[in-house]
Amino acid sequence: MNDQIIWIVLKRLRTPFLVIIVTFSISILGLMLIPGADNSGKVYYMSFFDAFYFVSYTASTIGFGETPYTFTYPQRMWVSASIYITVIGWFYGIGTIISLIQDETLRKAINRNSFRREILGLVEPFYIILGYNSITKSIINRVNKNEFRVVVLDRSEEKIEELILENFYPNVPAFVGEASNQKMLQIAGIHQKNCFGVISLFENDSKNTEIATICRLLNKKVDVIVKASAPQHLEYFKSIGLEHVQNPFEIISKRMYYSITAPHIWLLEMWIYGHALNLRNRDLLPHGKYIICGYGRMGIAIEEGLKKAGIDYIFFDINSEEYKQRKDTTIFGDEEDVTKLLELGIMDSECIIAATKDDLLNLTILNKAKVLNPDIYTIARENSLDGINIFQAAKIDRIYILEQILADTTYNYLAQPLTEIFIQEIRKKDEEWAVVIVNMLHTITGANPDYFELQITQENAYALSLELSKETKVTLSNLRRSREDRNKLLHIVYLLLKRGEEIYLMPESHMEIQLEDQLLIVCDDEGRNDFEYIINNIHELNYVLTSKEKSYNFFQKKD
Amino acid sequence: MSMDKIVSGFFFILAMTLNFGFFIGDITVIEQHSAFELFAAIIINIIATILKLGDKTQLGAVLLATSLVADIQLIASATVWAFAEYVLGGLNVESTTAIVSLSGGALLANVVSVILFVGDTIKSKR
């Protein structure tokens, strides 16, 4: 790749070099052959050096004057001719070099080179993100900080420039390139050992399919994270062995179902995604009749959820594009629309879901519904993150933002894989269990607890892994003691323990910890710091485990 | 037969022959070595170098390298000449020997270059 640049330059510079050499040599030769006169009038022939010196500064238009002696007329005639040929030759050469610097092909080659070098220089694990938009931006923002590095490919130059202006730290290498182009993927480092995966969340399912297939063929080991909403694509992805397929509609469908049948399970899931850990009144979905506006992918997904939950629903088949064409507006709510809503029974319905592809249409539908029936519960689908403020201002009870869901789930998959397992596990439990857990979290870790993931390795838990390698038995409850006073308990709760392929939801406190165990732990503000301090510091750990202070005396025999 | 081959072959061989022409003669006697011949040798060598630019093959790279060697040697030879003439105040046996032997080195590089070129031509099936 590096050679490419040199070859481009050399090839372009061939003619200008030739022109300069030929014009210079003709002028030099002429000057040497034409007799001049020295100060006393004797005949003097210029030497090579004289001629070369004179032509060099004349051609480059520096012009020091006539050296070594004033020229004779025949010399001047030759010089006037040679000025024209050498100066033109010189300018032509310079012009070519300058245009070469500005040359698009060369600039691209240089940029690509530096992009490639940057990626070869990455030592941390990284993900390749295809397409830069608000979803991937929010993923980059969260992932880039600590867990992984990110490389971005986008086919639009504008998008790449936008990304560069963001000034991510650490730097996010980005380059203009078609995502389905094998060569670009290779340059982006898909073959590199530290390339963990490729993230492709394009709106277009078949594009994702194409990319996933290419990535699989290029490197079997990389993880491909794709979005898919149609069932045939989902099946295809499973068949080529993709573990992680993002389907935002399926997520919405499940959330609907749990929100209605088991609000506390829903709450735990939403808490993982940043919701506060308490159920407000507006978080509770009504159990009455639902109106679903729009029978698209989202409508079908919601139907599935509602059907499973045994809720009565009715479809209002409204297609945003068709509506826009017919009425020439996206403002919903003329008389015809109102009659339609009334016909559907808006007055005795308890919830209305606006699930069309058009954000403005969704907003106006819900507004109209609220006017007609102020008590109705409103749910909106929001397609892009850009309009988030309008939706918040419109006082809609619940908003499903597709881009946000994609970004959140992808981030969790990348950075907090245990949370996903946790969500799957709690879905197998019932509402009563969830109520108990939520209450327990409240009493131990406070109203708004945080969580973190941890793997017991030498790097993350130095003291503990040292202790474990001595085959000391350490149980989960041992580690829950406070380092201030070991009779007190730390404000932490173990949510999940993963050992190899085995998963323990709410592990028993007398369980023994082993090396390489992964833990999902809930904590309050101080809990995390304390816990990490204990498992990393030999003295603290010793105190917590045995209540004895370890001696600092070096002369004492080691026990 | 291509025009390209004729032009480049012409310059490669001319570079060698001119170089040889300058080199031949008593190594200590500057009168036996024409300054014009050295000038011509330098110019033709540089042109030959430029003609070798931009060839991406392995052979092209080696040809370019030999040519660059010849250029450097010849230019060094001319520089020694100018330095001895103007700075040291005239040629002596030592500088004359240096000038001619530098061009001798360039001749060697040129010979290698021509051998490679001829070898490639013989190998070619067209």
Image: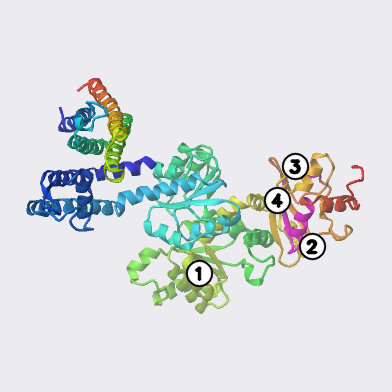
Q: Residue A411 carries which label?
A: none
The residue type indicated by label 2 comes to Ile
Q: Residue A454 carries which label?
A: 4
Q: Is residue A401 above or below residue A328?
A: above
Please determine if labels 1 and 4 lie on a single subunit. Answer: yes
Which residue occupies the foreground of this view, A160 or B67?
B67
The residue carrying mark 1 is A388
Secondary structure beneath label 3: loop
- Of circles 4 and 2, the one toward us is 4
Q: Can residue A177 be seen in this view?
A: no
Range of the magenta residues?
A512-535
Secondary structure beneath label 4: strand
- Rendered location of residue A422, percent (x, y): 67, 52
Please determine if labels 1 and 2 lie on a single subunit. Answer: yes
Q: Earlier in the sequence, mark 1 or mark 2?
A: 1
Which quadrant holds the C terminus of chain B?
Answer: top left
- Of circles 2 and 3, the one toward us is 3
| C-alpha separation, residue under disc 2 versus residue under disc 3 | 26 Å
Which quadrant holds the N terminus of chain B?
Answer: top left
The residue carrying pointer 1 sits among few (fewer than 14), some (14 to 19) or many (20 or more) residues within 10 Å by Cα, namely: few
Q: Residue A444 carries which label?
A: 2
Q: Earlier in the sequence, mark 1 or mark 4?
A: 1
Please determine if labels 4 and 2 lie on a single subunit. Answer: yes
Whether residue A90 sits left or right of residue A176 in the image: it is left
The residue type indicated by label 4 comes to Leu
The residue carrying pointer 4 sits among few (fewer than 14), some (14 to 19) or many (20 or more) residues within 10 Å by Cα, namely: some
Q: Which of marks 3 and 4 is nearer the N terminus?
A: 4
The residue carrying mark 3 is A515
Q: Dots 1 and 2: beta carbons under 8 Å?
A: no
The residue type indicated by label 3 comes to Leu
The residue carrying pointer 3 sits among few (fewer than 14), some (14 to 19) or many (20 or more) residues within 10 Å by Cα, namely: some
